[in-house]
DNA sequence: TAAAATTATGTGTATATACTCCTATATAAA
DNA sequence: TTTATATAGGAGTATATACACATAATTTTA
């Protein structure tokens, strides 16, 4: 256990704790708040923005298929879509196979997406300016690699 | 808007959508599930593990101070600690300044931390094996940089 | 010292996340 | 064709997250 079980006062160490899960969650909290704030004028959050983009590109799509694509638990996606359906952003309709449900972006959903897009661009640009394009590309690739490690079980 | 507003069928594009928020959240979902699964025998999740480590190192600490250190909303931290207090992992006691509350890891909390530590090490090692030490260091640094960008407002 | 401003925290509400168990439906096997 | 199995999704429960608002206590200011 070395230095972890000893109750030393070393506050600065906290910022460099090397737990990948912790650091990833910490960065996600900060970045999510950043995007959510930038997107606020459009009335949606970054999670909803991402789902609208995904639906625009791959929709209509089945819940389970979409969930797998975006590495989101099926039940999580369902609950997120439930909110968006109430807001009129998406449509969920049963398929011929009566077990399935097709998810589609609605007209109002597309309108909100159009409104949100420039706001998202601004957020994205701010980060790109500060981080640099190449560094971001490496980061995105590393995040993908992390997903592969996590799912290789 | 270019290719985003056109309902083209290009499912593979989804995996490379360049929204930093989306990719970060996606990776965090996968990695959090990974750590949570590895830590399950100890009965805690990676969020709780991180909080126990933090408290072991810097505790006793005030709620707001800890929240700032770990880039977590004050109210989020309060709610997380509430659960851990019910489980007996932490103690929350009022300070001399009667507005404040000191948070401390308990004896049972330390015991759980000791039990969880080797499990966490295994999770960490698996990722390190696959990613390599240098790549991970770069990744951690980039996550820190992201936090700085997000908070520079 | 009394009033104003600041600070530390709690509460209400809402979204985000995912595990476990359950139901309905479809497909495969006997 | 009946039975067994696999699949798609929903519901219950619990943690994680954070914004807006409220409260109590302290500090600053007039």
Image (spheres, coloured by chain):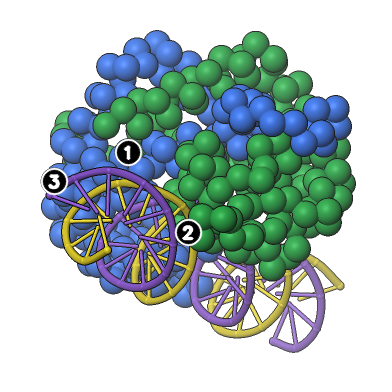
Chain colours: A green, B blue, C purple, D yellow
Give the spatial CA distance, label 1 vs label 2. Answer: 30 Å
Q: In which quarter of the image is residue B18?
A: top right
Return the chain for callout 1. B
Disc 3 or 1, which lies upstream in sequence? Answer: 1
| Residue toward you, B21 or B49 | B21
Residue hosting label 2: A99
The structure residue drawn at horizontal position 18% and vertical position 38%, both measured from the top left corner, is B119
Please give left or right for residue C14 compared with residue D15 in the image: right
Q: Can residue A36 be seen in this view?
A: no
Q: In this view, does A15 lie above or below B105?
A: above
Q: Is residue B23 visible?
A: yes
Q: Are marks 3 and 1 in contact (CB under 8 Å)?
A: no
The structure residue drawn at horizontal position 44% and vertical position 48%, both measured from the top left corner, is A73
| Residue toward you, D11 or A41 | D11
Please give left or right for residue D25 compared with residue A14 in the image: right
Residue hosting label 3: B115
Give the spatial CA distance, label 3 vs label 1. Answer: 18 Å
């Amino acid at each position: 256990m070395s230095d972890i079980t000893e109750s030393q006062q070393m506050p600065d160490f906290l910022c460099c704790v090397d737990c990948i899960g912790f650091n990833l969650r910490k960065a996600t909290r900060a970045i999510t708040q950043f995007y959510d704030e930038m997107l606020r004028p459009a009335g949606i959050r970054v999670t909803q923005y991402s789902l609208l983009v995904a639906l625009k590109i791959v929709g209509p799509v089945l819940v389970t298929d979409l969930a797998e694509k975006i590495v989101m638990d099926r039940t999580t996606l369902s609950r997120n879509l439930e909110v968006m359906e109430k807001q009129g952003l998406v449509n969920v309709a049963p398929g011929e196979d009566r077990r399935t449900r097709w998810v589609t972006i609605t007209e109002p959903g597309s309108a909100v997406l159009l409104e949100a897009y420039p706001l998202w661009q601004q957020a994205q640009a701010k980060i790109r300016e500060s981080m640099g394009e190449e560094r971001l590309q490496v980061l995105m690739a590393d995040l993908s690699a992390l997903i592969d490690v996590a799912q290789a079980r």
